[in-house]
Image (cartoon, rainbow, N blue to C red):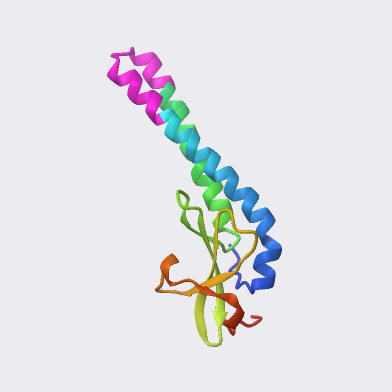
């Protein structure tokens, strides 16, 4: 993995591909949830071992795909903060401080940032960032 510091401009340029990758992660996560429920239903209904094991193997493969997709996205330098809430952070720098550029699913572009130790609730508008080119 190559470490990347993003500016608002480079983060917004990367955003279409990041959003595509993240949408795939969400879809894979939803598939895992469905498979977990199907597996639980088989167990609850007293299904036979063969049916249970086939479904378990299907779920294991789906989990492996999910984790690989997450690893691939994070290899770009983007941090997945929450799949469920659709939160991604891009590492950046504000003056001499390391910060996160913050994106939430549904937003068209990177519009906010927050400190390393702050979360989503600490988001601030980019207009007054002082975020500079690395």
Which of the pair 36/55 is nearer the observer? 36
Give how far across and how far down residue 117 sits, in percent: 40, 74
Residue 73, located in which quarter of the rendered image?
bottom right
Q: Is residue 92 left or right of residue 51?
A: right
Quadrant in which the C terminus appears: bottom right
Q: Is residue 42 magenta?
A: yes
The number of numbered badges drawn on the structure is: 0
Residue 111, located in which quarter of the rendered image?
bottom right
Main secondary structure found in the magenta portion: helix
- The magenta-colored residue range is 36-54
Q: Is residue 50 above or below residue 37?
A: above
**Residue for point 40% across, 15% down:** 51
Q: Is residue 21 magenta?
A: no
Residue farthest to the right?
Answer: 13
Give how far across and how far down residue 34 sits, in percent: 44, 30
Q: Is residue 88 above or below residue 48?
A: below
Give how far across and how far down residue 75 sits, in percent: 57, 58
Q: Is residue 97 above or below residue 27?
A: below
**Residue for point 47% across, 27% down:** 58
Residue farthest to the bottom?
Answer: 96
Quadrant in which the N terminus appears: bottom right
**Residue for point 56% across, 54% down:** 105
């Amino acid at each position: 993995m190559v470490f990347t510091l993003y500016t608002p401009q480079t983060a917004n340029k990367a955003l279409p591909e990041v959003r595509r990758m993240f949408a795939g992660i969400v879809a894979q996560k939803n598939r895992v949830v469905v498979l977990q429920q199907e597996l639980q239903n088989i167990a609850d209904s007293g299904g036979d071992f063969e049916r249970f094991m086939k479904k378990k193997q299907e779920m294991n493969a789906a989990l492996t795909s999910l984790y690989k997709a997450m690893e691939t996205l994070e290899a770009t330098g983007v941090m997945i903060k929450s799949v469920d809430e659709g939160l991604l952070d891009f590492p950046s720098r504000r003056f001499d401080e390391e910060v996160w550029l913050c994106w939430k699913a549904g937003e068209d572009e990177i519009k906010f940032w927050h400190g390393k130790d702050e979360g989503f609730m600490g988001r601030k508008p980019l207009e007054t960032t002082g975020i500079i080119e690395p």
